[in-house]
Every structure is written in C-alpha cells, then in structure tokens.
Image: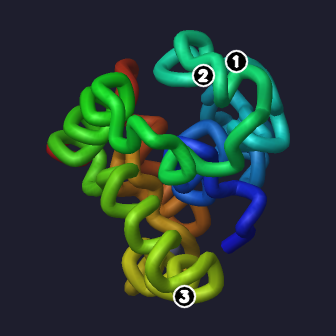
Amino acid sequence: MKAELIAPCGMNCNVCSSYLALENETKTKGVKLPYCVGCRPRNKNCSFVKKRCELLGEGKVEFCYECTKFPCDLLKRLASGYEQHYHMNMIDNLRYIKEHGMDKFLEKEQKKWECPQCGGTICCHNGICYSCSLEKMKTKKKRYRWDD
Ligand SMILES: [Zn+2]
C-alpha cells in the first residue's frame, strides 16, 4: 500500500472503490465505476472535510491530527459513518499513524484488507476483491455493498 494514498482525514484511499477501480481498470472489464487517483494525488477539495476546513484547504496540515481541534465535529461525523458502513474509522487510523508511524500503519492495513483468496486488496466500500471477485459487481444494477 502507498503512503501517499493516506488522506489528511485518515481515509485509506488504497482500499477505496474508485481507486481500486482505476488500479484494476474495471471499465475495460465491463464494470463501470468512477475512477479516482486518491484524495491526496487528486488534490481537489474533499466534499466531507476540506471544503469546510481552512487549514486543510490551504494545505497547512498534512494530517488532521496536527490540528488543535482534532478530532473536530466534521471528522467525527465522517469517521462514524465509515465505521458503521465501511469497516474503518479515520480517527482511529490517524491516532495509530501519530503513535506508531506510517510504515507500521501501512503494514497493519495490508493485513487487514488482504484478500484471503488471492492476496489482492479488499475494498472498504463493498467488501469485494477487485482482483478475483469483480464478476460479483456485474450481477447488480446498484452499487455493491458489504451486506449485499
Ligand atoms: Zn482476491
């Protein structure tokens, strides 16, 4: 997993549906998903946090944990939604990075999201491995979710 794909909010873009779609070129395999290079490389205003945070918007912090308001209400809302639906909590991620460093975090994430079948990466948004289980996405009209 790539360190540059850990967003300022603690989101791990390595396991995002849109990043994995790009990396696995799903459009060429008959699965139309939006492509994204990851929050940090994309460097656009994040609709959840960055748009409403001056420090992030102006690039004054690398990670939200550097902020005196950490964890702010915006981040709390985002993290609780992700914890509920996508098996990840950005605030926990950031606390781990702050305490143990990026390398340890990436190691942990690698283990957490590794596909037991093929060693590929499981997507946090839908629980699917894009390397070996992409076929599952073709059977659904709506977006695939963990509980489907
Ligand atoms: Zn797999």
Q: Return the mark for residue 36.
A: none
At 45% across and 64% down in the image, what residue appears? 122
Residue at the far front in the pictured view: 68
Vertically, is 133 above or below 51?
below
Q: Nearer the viewer, residue 146 or 12?
A: 12
Q: Are marks 2 and 1 in contact (CB under 8 Å)?
A: yes
- Residue type pointed to by label 3: Lys
Q: Name the residue under label 1.
A: 45
- Residue type pointed to by label 2: Lys
Q: Name the residue under label 2.
A: 50
Percent position of residue 21, x then y: 66, 44
Q: Coloring scheme of the render?
A: rainbow
Q: Name the image quarter holding the C terminus.
A: top left
Quadrant of the rendered image containing residue 73: top left
Q: In this view, does 23 lie to the left or right of 85?
A: right
Q: In this view, does 29 lie to the left or right of 89?
A: right
Q: Mark 3 points at which residue?
A: 104
Q: Name the image quarter holding the N terminus.
A: bottom right
